[in-house]
Image (tube, grey):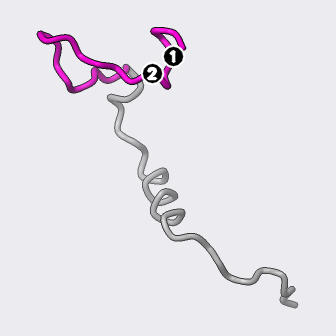
Amino acid sequence: MTENDPRTPHVPEPDESSVPTLEDDETIAPRPEEEIADALRAEPDVSDHREHRP
C-alpha cells in the first residue's frame, strides 16, 4: 500500500487536525431527491416481486 492509497488509514501529525479536510465536491449539500432516495433505500425491499399483477 502506498501513501495515497485510500485503504491506508491516515494518522495525523501532532500539529495536524484529526478532522479531515473536505474536498470541493463534499462542500455542496445533497439535492433533496438524493436525500429522499437514501431514505427509501434505508430499509431493504424484501417483498416477493415474482407475482405479476394484471
Label 1: how many residues lie within 10 Å, few (<14), some (14-19) or many (20+)? few
Q: Which residue is mark 1?
A: 5
Start and end of the magenta stretch? 1-23
Closest to the observer, 54 or 49: 49
For this view, does 6 lie left or right of residue 54? left
Pinpoint residue 17: horizontal percent, then vertical percent: 16, 19
Instruction: Report the residue that reaches farthest toward the left.
Output: 15
| Element type at mark 2 | loop
Residue 25, x across and y down, in percent: 41, 25
Residues packed near mark 2 inside 10 Å, few (<14), some (14 to 19) or many (20 plus): few
Q: Residue at x 49, y 22 (%)?
A: 6
Q: Disc 2 vs disc 1: Cβ atoms closer than 8 Å?
A: yes
Q: Amino acid at mark 1?
A: Asp
Q: Is residue 3 magenta?
A: yes
State the mark number for residue 28: none
> Label 2: which residue?
8
Q: Residue 7 versus residue 20: which sits nearer the camera?
A: 7
**Residue located 49% across and 25% down the image:** 7
Helix, strand or loop at disc 1? loop
Left or right, residue 25 beside residue 47: left
Residue extending furthest front?
Answer: 1
Q: Position of residue 19 (x, y in %)?
A: 21, 26
- Residue 44 appears left or right of 6: right
Who's the residue at 48% across and 11% down the image? 4
| Residue nearer the viewer, 32 or 12 | 12
